[in-house]
Image: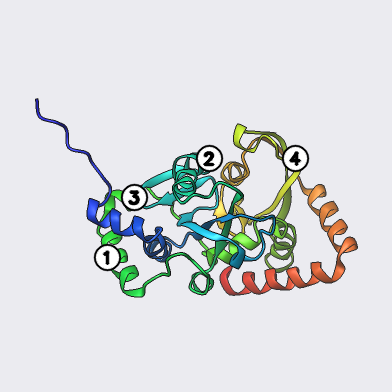
Amino acid sequence: MTKKKKITQFPEYILRDWEANDGVNFAVALARITGWLLHVDWWSPTDNKEVVENMRSLRVYVGTNSNQIYDLKGKYTIATFTNNIIMPIAKKRGENYGTGVTRYYSEDKLFTLPLRVKPDESRIRAAQEIISTNTDFLVKIQKRQDPIVPAHIAADFTFGRCNPFATALYDLKGYKPVAIIAKEYNKLFALSKLGYAHSFAFDNNGNAVDVWGNDTVENIAQRFGITKYDLDEAEHFKVSDKLKSNSPGKYAEIYEEASAIIKEFFI
């Protein structure tokens, strides 16, 4: 009986090269093609998780605005990726004491980081060519929705800054801002706090809009692992007033940044 040949997304020699370089060239290439977000998983041997010079890089990969990760070895959920990819790498490198840390970056910032393996422009371009010709791989990747704000900027306005962004959409575009009130989370987000979770806006056609572009309410809720929710316009403004009261200067700064993004991308 003939042994069934193992099917891989890319040739084995290509995967070995990408693997040896911690996925950095693959990840930058894929981020350029898809517009999704560059991530680095680090190992921190200390409690100081803010200074990258104190940490050691394990893997570079691409993530969407939800629970999906695209690595050189395929598509994963966050939990599966951590258990099947990151922890074995850490163990292999003898990282017995400490903890894993995930950060996202712009491409420009990534090139300045003290990574174990630095990105190589010629290898990135080669990876772009290889990935671009693999339509079976690309078709499985979630597409970004218009308007497309650079992913690292969109990520900044996903947590904490979503409320001023929704208010700016209201002021500049006339969109109706609402809050998602989480009533229940899936298992992965089970420890998340119930109640106010996120603000977005409805455009004049009834589409749900936030910094990641046009979407559905269901998809936005799923990004945060929310399975049951209410929508509350009054709660959005209540949270907005609280933010303004607690940190007026910071709120004004974030609001101005949001307004600039909307004026540039939400034409």
131 w.r.t. 123: above or below: above
Splitting the image into 4 quarters, where does residue 231 fall?
A: top right
Q: Position of residue 52 (x, y in %)?
A: 60, 65
Residue at image position (68%, 68%) is 258
Foreground label between 3 and 1: 1
Question: In screen coordinates, is 217 left or right of 16?
Answer: right
Nearest to viewer (mark 3 / mark 4): 4
State whether residue 216 is above or below residue 209: above
- Label 2: element kind: helix
| Structural distance between the alpha carbons of marks 4 and 2 | 19 Å
- Residue farthest along the top direction in this orientation: 1
First along the sequence among labels 3 and 4? 3
What is the x, y in percent for residue 41? 53, 55
Amino acid type at image mark 4: Lys
Among the two numbered marks 3 and 1 on one chain, the one whose residue lies closer to the N terminus: 1
Q: Where residue 5 sits: x, y (%)?
A: 17, 37
> Label 3, on which residue?
139
The amino acid at mark 2 is Ala
The mark found on residue 79 in the picture is: 2
Are there few (<14), some (14-19), or many (20+) residues within 10 Å of tag 1?
Answer: few
Q: Secondary structure at mark 1?
A: helix
**Label 2: few (<14), some (14–19) or many (≥20) C-alpha neighbours in 10 Å:** few
Residue at the (53%, 60%) spot, across then down:
56
Q: Are marks 4 and 2 in contact (CB under 8 Å)?
A: no
Residue 44: x percent and y percent?
Answer: 60, 55
- CB within 8 Å, label 1 to label 2: no
Which residue is identified by label 1? 129
**Tag 2 or tag 3, which sits nearer the N-term?**
2
Q: Which is nearer the N-term, disc 4 or disc 2?
A: 2
Residue marked by disc 4: 193
User: Disc 3 to disc 1, how far (Cα)?
Assistant: 16 Å
